Image (tube, rainbow, N blue to C red):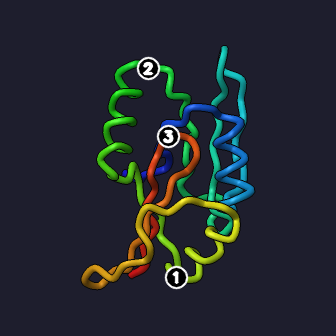
Amino acid sequence: MRIKLTSIMVDDQDKALKFYTEILGFQKKVEIPAGEYRWLTVVSPDEPNGTELVLEPNANPASKVYQKALFDQGIPLTALEVDDAQTEYERLQKLGVVFSMKPTKMGPATIAIFEDTCGNRIQIYQI
């Protein structure tokens, strides 16, 4: 058993694709029309055949409530590993990314939290 796909809810697939590729640096892997939306995934350029992140349209009212509740409470929807949290924080800040938590040492990890422009808080972490 392996994890091959994981989803993140987004309020706009085009905006999400732009943010996750142009700002975060992921690469588009799959884009297939699926009715009103698309099956749209991105991957790390370091692992093009690795786990795919599905940019899932947030069209379900229940998921909208869940997404907003997490955001309002400051809870990240997911976490992304980085080699150097401080360097990544500085790079993303220069690109206009809004952080709700600067890099902070927490035990063996350093974490930071930012907004993805699509309704989510995302944590980056370095071990």
Give the labeled residue for mark 1.
Answer: 86
The reply to whether discs 1 and 3 touch (Cβ–Cβ < 8 Å) is no
Where 119 falls versus 25 (above or below)? above
Farthest residue toward the left? 107
Residue 50: give x, y in percent of width and height.
Answer: 57, 59
Q: Say what amino acid the circle numbered 2 marks.
A: Asn
Residue 57: give x, y in percent of width and height.
Answer: 55, 29
Kindly state the secondary structure of the residue where label 1 is placed: helix
Side of 42 relative to 4 (left or right): right
First in residue order: circle 2 vs circle 1: 2
Residue drawn at point x = 37 percent, y = 51 percent: 1
Q: Say what amino acid the circle numbered 3 marks.
A: Gly
- Cα distance between the residues tagged 2 and 1: 36 Å
Residue 20's mark? none
First in residue order: circle 3 vs circle 2: 2
First in residue order: circle 1 vs circle 3: 1
Residue drawn at point x = 66 percent, y = 27 percent: 38
Give the labeled residue for mark 3.
Answer: 119
Quadrant in which residue 26 is drawn: bottom right
Q: Residues within 10 Å of mark 3 (few under 14, many from 20)?
A: many
Quadrant in which residue 46 is drawn: bottom right
Residue 60's mark? 2
Q: Residues within 10 Å of mark 1 (few under 14, many from 20)?
A: some
Q: Say what amino acid the circle numbered 1 marks.
A: Gln
Residue 13: give x, y in percent of width and height.
Answer: 65, 34
Kindly state the secondary structure of the residue where label 3 is placed: loop
